[in-house]
Image (cartoon, grey):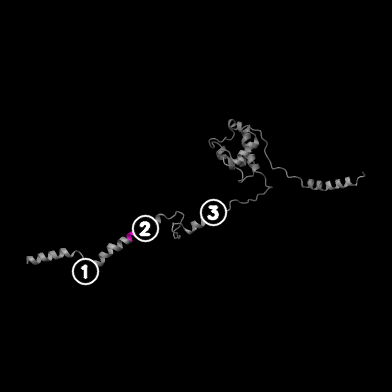
């Protein structure tokens, strides 16, 4: 009896926990399939973490994780025209120097403004600049100087930027006149002068020698 119990215990110790095909299938499933599912889940998590912030849910991403919409936007940016044409009404009233100052200059030249820029009505800061003359100040404003970017080519005409320069300089002690658009040449004067020349030449030719 004791020999049979000893043999049975030895037999169970050598057979292991798998005793039928069902247990074998479960062991294979948990040994191979579950790790594969875990790996796939980790890869999906990593790929979703590299998804661009601008990509919306459901966007088709390429190999590098870039959406079609992002690629189209990048291509459009590369093909964008370098220059553009802006049509302005040449007969519109010019903006005042104060209006241009408040719209485009007050951030740097207002109070408190930005360090290094002459603040509005600060006579001590404007005195050496006023001594340079209006043309120099206008050139600095239009083309930029130091930390100040160019102000020309924006929403205002050059003469309007000049009006803002005069507005600030005069508030600091300057006496510059307010600039205006140059007067258009009279169309009738040139047209009348043109036929006058041939008439004078004809009169000289017909005069007695």
Q: Could you tell me how many numbered marks the image carries?
A: 3
Q: Residue furthest bottom?
A: 21
Quarter of the C terminus within the rendering: top right
Left or right: 8, with 117 as reference point: left
Label 3 vs 2, first from the N-terminus: 2
Q: Is residue 183 magenta?
A: no
Q: Looking at the picture, how far across and down is residue 28, in whole percent?
A: 27, 65
Question: Taking 145 as reference, is 86 above or below it?
Answer: below
Question: Taking 87 as reference, is 121 above or below it?
Answer: above
For residue 43, the mark is 2
Residue bearing the label numbered 3: 78
Q: Residue at point 29% right, 63% down?
A: 32
Query: Viewer-proximal residue, 170 or 49?
Result: 49
Label 1 vs 2, first from the N-terminus: 1
Are dots 1 and 2 in contact, CB under 8 Å? no
Q: Residue at point 49% right, 57% down?
A: 71
Secondary structure at badge 3 equals helix
Residue bearing the label numbered 1: 20
Crowd tier of the residue under label 2, counting other residues whose Cα lies within 10 Å: few below 14, some 14–19, many 20 or above: few
Q: Residue at point 65% right, 36% down?
A: 134
Q: Residue furthest top?
A: 124
Q: Quadrant of residue 124?
A: top right
State how far apart marks 1 and 2 are (Cα). 35 Å
For residue 114, the mark is none
Secondary structure at badge 2 equals helix
Q: Which residues are magenta?
A: 37-43
Quarter of the N terminus within the rendering: bottom left
């Amino acid at each position: 009896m004791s020999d049979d119990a000893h043999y049975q215990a030895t037999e169970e110790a050598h057979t292991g926990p798998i005793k039928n095909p069902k247990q074998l299938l479960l062991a294979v499933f948990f040994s191979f399939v579950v790790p594969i599912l875990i790996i796939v889940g980790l890869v999906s998590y990593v790929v979703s973490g590299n998804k661009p912030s601008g990509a919306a849910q459901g966007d088709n991403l390429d190999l590098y994780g870039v959406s079609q919409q992002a690629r189209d936007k990048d291509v459009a940016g590369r093909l964008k025209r370098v220059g553009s044409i802006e049509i302005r009404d040449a007969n519109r009233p010019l903006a005042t120097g104060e209006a241009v100052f408040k719209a485009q200059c007050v951030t740097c030249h207002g109070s408190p403004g930005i360090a290094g820029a002459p603040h509005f009505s600060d006579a001590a800061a404007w005195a050496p600049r006023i001594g340079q003359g209006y043309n120099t100040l206008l050139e600095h404003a239009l083309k930029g100087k130091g930390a100040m970017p160019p102000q020309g080519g924006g929403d205002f005409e050059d003469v309007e930027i000049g009006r803002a320069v005069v507005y600030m300089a005069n508030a600091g002690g300057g006496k510059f006149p307010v600039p205006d658009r140059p007067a258009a040449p009279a169309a009738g004067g040139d047209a009348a002068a043109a036929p006058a020349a041939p008439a004078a030449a004809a009169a000289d030719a017909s005069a007695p020698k």
